[in-house]
Amino acid sequence: MTEHVIITTADGVMEIKFNRADKRNALTQPMYGAVADAFAHAAEDKSVRCVVLCAAGDHFSAGNDISDFAGRPAAATNTESQTTRFLRAISTAPKPIVAAVQGNAVGVGTTMLLHCDLVVAATSARLALPFANLGLVPEAASSLLLPHLVGWQRAAEAFMLGDVIDAATAFAWGMVNRVVEQPDMLATAHALAQRLAAKSPSALRHTKALMRGAPEDVAARMKEEGAIFAAQLQSPEAKEAFAAFFEKRKPDFSKFG
Ligand code: COA
C-alpha cells in the first residue's frame, strides 16, 4: 500500500493514478508494486474492462526515482524488483490500457506508454528517454519497440541525444493517438475507455494478443536490457550522472572511455 498510487474503479474502468506530484511522480519501488498489483487485479476481475493510466499534477512521471537508482545495492539487481513486476504486468496485460499524459514523461514514464493501447496527450506533454544522459540504457523492451514504431533515426535521437519529443511530434511519430488541451485530457481518455469497456471483452483480449505477435520477443528483450541496465547502474558513469542530478549540474563524462 502506498498513498502515491490511487486506484479507483467505476463503470468497468479501473483508473490507476500516480500521486506523487511534488516529486513529479518519480516512481519508487512501492509505487511499481502497487501498479503491478492493480494490473493483476484488473486481469482477474471480470467487471474491469479497461484500465486508464494517469497522473496527478502537471507531470505524468519523471521516471524512476533517481535516489532509488543511486541507493540500489549491486546484490539487489539479482532479485526480482517491483520494477520488473510492473514491467511484466503492463507488457502482458490482457485488457486494453488507455494512458493520459501531461507534462514531462521521462524514462519509464515514456517507455510504459509503448505498452498502452491508446495514448491521449495534453499539449503540454514532453516525452523523453534520456537514459544515455544517466549512463543507462533503454528498458521496458523500448530498444525493440521504439525503433519499430517510429524508425531507427528518430529512436536514436530520443535514446542517444535524449532530446524531448513534444506532443505534436509524438503525434506525428505515431506515439500518441490524440493531442488535447490539458483540462480535456482525462475526460478524453475516459471517453475512449468507456467505448472500449462496451466492446466484446473476448474480442478485445484476442485482438490485443494478436497485435502483440510474439510476446516472448518482448520478454527476452526486457531480460537482456535488464542485465545491461543493472550493470550500468553500478558504473562510474551512472554514479556521476546521479550525483550531478542531485547537485543540479550537468554530468561530466569526459574522463570515461
Ligand atoms: N527521481 C527522484 N526525484 C526526482 C526525480 C526523479 N526521477 N525527478 C524529479 N525529482 C524531484 C526533484 O529532486 C525535486 O525534489 P526537491 O523538491 O526535493 O528538490 C522535485 O522532484 C521537483 O523536481 P524539479 O527538477 O525541481 O522539477 P522541474 O519541474 O523543474 O523538472 C523534470 C521536472 C522531470 C524535467 C526534472 O525533475 C527531471 O529532469 N527529472 C529527472 C528525470 C530523469 O532523468 N529520470 C530518470 C529517467 S531514466
Image (cartoon, grey):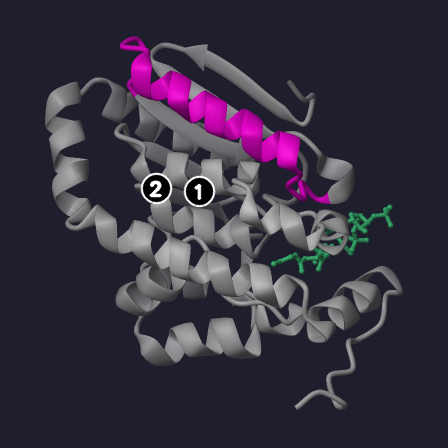
Task: Name the secondary structure under disc 2.
Answer: helix
Which span is picked out in magenta? 24-49
Of residue 244 and residue 180, the one placed in the foreground of this image is 244
Residue 122: mark in rendering? none
Q: Main secondary structure of the magenta part?
A: helix
Confirm or deny contact between disc 1 and disc 2 (CB under 8 A). Answer: yes
Identify the residue at horizontal 52%, vertical 78% (top origin). Answer: 160
Please identify the quarter of the rendering in which residue 24 is found.
top right
Please identify the quarter of the rendering in which residue 30 is found.
top right
Give coordinates of residue 197: x percent, y percent: 26, 20
Residue under circle 2?
91
Give coordinates of residue 121: x percent, y percent: 46, 47
Residue under circle 1?
87
Quadrant in which the N terminus is drawn: top right
Of residue 87 and residue 223, the one placed in the foreground of this image is 223
Quadrant in which the C terminus is drawn: bottom right
Amino acid on which disc 1 is placed = Leu
Identify the residue at horizontal 39%, vertical 76% (top origin). Answer: 154
Task: Name the secondary structure under disc 1.
Answer: helix
Q: Residue furthest right?
A: 247
Identify the residue at horizontal 27%, vertical 66% (top origin). Answer: 148
Of residue 204 and residue 195, the one placed in the foreground of this image is 204
Identify the residue at horizontal 54%, vertical 62% (top origin). Answer: 229
Q: On the rendered structure, is 169 left or right of 91?
A: right
Q: CA distance from mark 1 to mark 2?
A: 6 Å
Q: On the rendered structure, is 211 left or right of 221?
A: left
